[in-house]
Amino acid sequence: MEHIVIIGNGISGITAARHVRKLSDHKITVISAETDHFFSRTALMYIYMGHMKYEHTKPYEDWFWEKNRIELKRGYVERVNTNAKLLTFVGGETMPYDKLVLATGSTPNKFGWPGQELKGVQGLYSYQDLQMMEANTKNIQRAVVVGGGLIGIEMAEMLLSRNIPVTFLVRENSFWNNVLPKEESEMINRHIREHHVDLRLAAELDEIIGDENGGVKGVRTKTGEEIACQFVGLTVGVSPNVNFLRDSGVELNRGVLVDEFLQTNIADVYAAGDCAEFRKPNGERRPIEQVWYTGRMMGETLARTLCGRQTAYQPGHWFNSAKFFDIEYQTYGWVWPQAKDTEGDFYWEEAGGKICLRLRWDKASRKLTGVNNFGFRLRHHAFDKWFDEGRTVDYVLEHLRDANFDPELYKTHETAILEQFNRENGTSLRLKKKSWKRILDFVS
Amino acid sequence: MQKDANLSIANPHPKDADVWQKLGLAIAGVGLLVLFLSWGNVPIPAAMGLTIALVGIIGGTTLYAYRLYMRQPAGIKNNGVWFKSLINRGALGWIAGIILTGFYVLLYWYPEYIGYKPNGANEGFVALFDPLSQFFKGKPASQWFLYGTLYTVSILALGIKFLFKYRHNSYQLKRTVSVIIAQLFLAYLVPEILEGLNYNGQTIDGHGIYYDADIKNVWPLDYDFFYGYHLDAMQQEAYQPVGVLYLIIGIAMFLLVTPILTYYVGKRWYCSWVCGCGGLAETAGDPFRHLSSKKLSAWKLERWLIHGVMVFVFVMTAATVYGYFWNTGEVFGLNIYNTFQKPYGFLIGATFSGVIGVGFYPMLGNRVWCRFGCPMAGYMGIIQRFKSRFRITTNGGQCISCGNCSTYCEQGIDVRAYAQKGQNIVRASCVGCGICSAVCPRGVLKLENGPEEKRHDLPPIIIGNKSVELQD
């Protein structure tokens, strides 16, 4: 029986711990400086908005850990001695390990703006950040959110839920357009404004202006405009939380460098989740994947290796999801902001401007390569299987009813989508009726 | 550089109550005030007072809800749910709970304190409802007429509010229109009109002869359906052919309609589309849905309680039917009324379903009765769990474990526990309200009816991860 120590109780670390327990009898310790128990980081926004309390964001009841013999240790690891296989906590306490998993997540980026250390300036990643945001946004008149990505728009939504007016500074000339194609990005621009957010596109932060008490009194943009505010949310991405490993001998770049088995340069030391950086990225994937789902999959994979079944991380077809205020987003496969020369492109948008679908396919083989859907839901299993089977865009469209995942009794869009596709592409595709037989076959 | 108009200057606080919302609240408040004043025997002319009360509550709530929700983009409206005193077990919640509970205690056991005078003119609260009762059936109101009217008004007014709140969700709209219509017509207007037409509720040979003319109030929820007085009333000559029709429908409902529909669509056809208890829970009770306990221990308690009540009602009814046909009044030497009917009526019929079931909305959530007590829900739950096409499908690997589904499940199902494993939710207690699917921010949950094959499958691993899949 080995002692497996996991630093970080987020989705990667906890998934690894749970699966190690399923596969073995090893002693497991999970260390966290953040909270006593695992909670869903993606749900932090809902605590601030009053949809849930912290306790609701915990996926397992507190008795779960003892029952499954997963020991929880609250503390901050200051030093990792990989020769002696010993961790040292702040305060001097030590803990030996046989195998070590680094699953320490990220910290919000700050790019050296003047005033970024003022009180009232912060990112949003940890539970402590949320508590800080609670204190920092008490009785304020306006907030500025900097950065046009997923956390930025969530922060804007959070602030609005407390009736705090928000100015949203986005460096790009359309929201998240380094990921989303033009039409989708513009749809979200419109929706942000529908919620009365003061959205400033192509606007860059230059300086955060402090008041006499060390708090924020405003920001200045690159064009010299000053915006009065008492809170600045910095949501310009996150970086692996690895500073405590600088002298450990574990090889770092931006994150902890790992091979396909999530193994570092040092024997018995592994990394998973946000903090891991692949030496060789997987296909089109980025070397650092900062997504809930990939964190979970790395945890699942690593548990096997830890239990003696050396297993390479081989994520399947890319998928992701988000929600921009009221508009849900799902994506399967790869949809680049601009279609590659080899790719066909189709975009359909409903008249109301809140529902859309984009398909990309390989022109030569007509095989589907990616889908974006906003404002309606599609079945993950359908697309996963269709990619596996190399289905063409034509096949996918004809069977689109099988993939519909909207609630029952909703208005459906398949007919409108096919009509437009046929019109634009000179095809004569016909919609097939929904088939439960095919749907059940997706899962097997 | 592109410069955008600062829209927020035009409307910086979209969620602050505007003058119309305040007016709506004031009108509804006046309606409620009239009810309280009449209770205190303030001499308000009943016809005018009742009109002000009912129109005020319905109209004021509608105006308020219209302004509240239509000023915001359509979408989930749970901001601040856990900050509000009324719906977060705060002081207002306790006050509401005590008032509701107190009202039920008076209604069931001390109706004279709300003005019901069976041997003389009604007073106060009940008297306020006399004109409407006279209109329907030419006799003064009872406490039950008052209750039925207020119950229907609550479902109507707060159902309309719910429709505005969920205007983006077609499933919620249709379901809610259905419960409102079911309550308004099947439970309220049709029975009252039947009485007006002398098909029910007459005094014959000095006895009030009455049967329950709400066809959707199905045994075993309607536990006294087989009581002697009830069976006799339905066979009363003066009530034919309506009485026997109700008898036949009543038997067909639990014997045929319930198992067949529950097989095809799950128990939701009843619990969240037509049932009166469900109707109140889904409309007036909607703001309290997050208060249900999601603990494993609560689920364990639930299974004992709901099935215990179900066995109780089966035994009680068996004894009742035996007593009716063999005219014994006793079974195995036990007095049927004292041993079975009276305890059931007091403990379950009144205390559990009424006092606790609704009175405790602000403490335990809006489905306490449906989850822990209702024998009809227990009966359909067994069908739903073992022989039904209904399930909530999980969308592959898209769950982010956020917890919104579990938090807003009024039945206390830990939906997330299934969703994060990629497993379908097949649970006896699910009433199919569809709110888990509505609040999910990632499009993970879908209520649907499909083949029983693979309904219960637990995938070995969530999809999306070939590293693990390949080796299994």
Image (cartoon, coloured by chain):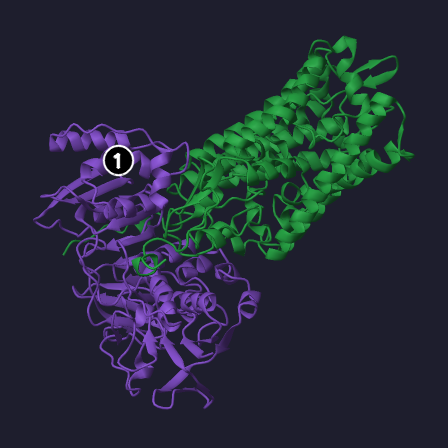
Classify the position of the C terminus of chain A by image quarter.
top left
Q: Position of residue B384 (x, y in %)?
A: 56, 38
Farthest-out residue, right: B333
Specify the colour of chain B.
green
Q: What is the three-letter code of the residue carrying label 1?
A: Glu
Looking at the image, can residue B47 be seen?
yes
Drawn side of residue B296 relative to residue A328, left or right: right
For mark 1, name the chain.
A
Q: Position of residue A371 (x, y in %)?
A: 23, 45
- Classify B211 as above or below A58: above
- Classify A164 as above or below B237: below
Of residues B209 and A228, the one drawn nearer to the viewer in this rendering: B209
Drawn side of residue B432 relative to residue A440, left or right: right
Of residues B391 and B364, the one drawn nearer to the viewer in this rendering: B391
The residue located at (47%, 68%) in the rendering is A21
- Classify B238 as above or below A272: above
Q: Position of residue A189 (x, y in %)?
A: 25, 49
Q: Quadrant of residue B128?
A: top right
The residue located at (37%, 87%) in the rendering is A79
Specify the colour of chain A.
purple
Drawn side of residue B294 relative to residue A328, left or right: right
Q: Position of residue B159 (x, y in %)?
A: 54, 34
Q: Quadrant of residue A403?
A: top left
Of residues A310 and A14, the one drawn nearer to the viewer in this rendering: A310
Looking at the image, can residue B354 be seen?
no
Residue that mark 1 sits on = A350
Circle 1 — which element? loop
Of residues B257 and A346, the one drawn nearer to the viewer in this rendering: B257
- Classify B152 as above or below A113: above
Q: How many marks?
A: 1
Q: Quadrant of residue A294?
A: bottom left
Q: Residues within 10 Å of mark 1 (few under 14, many from 20)?
A: few
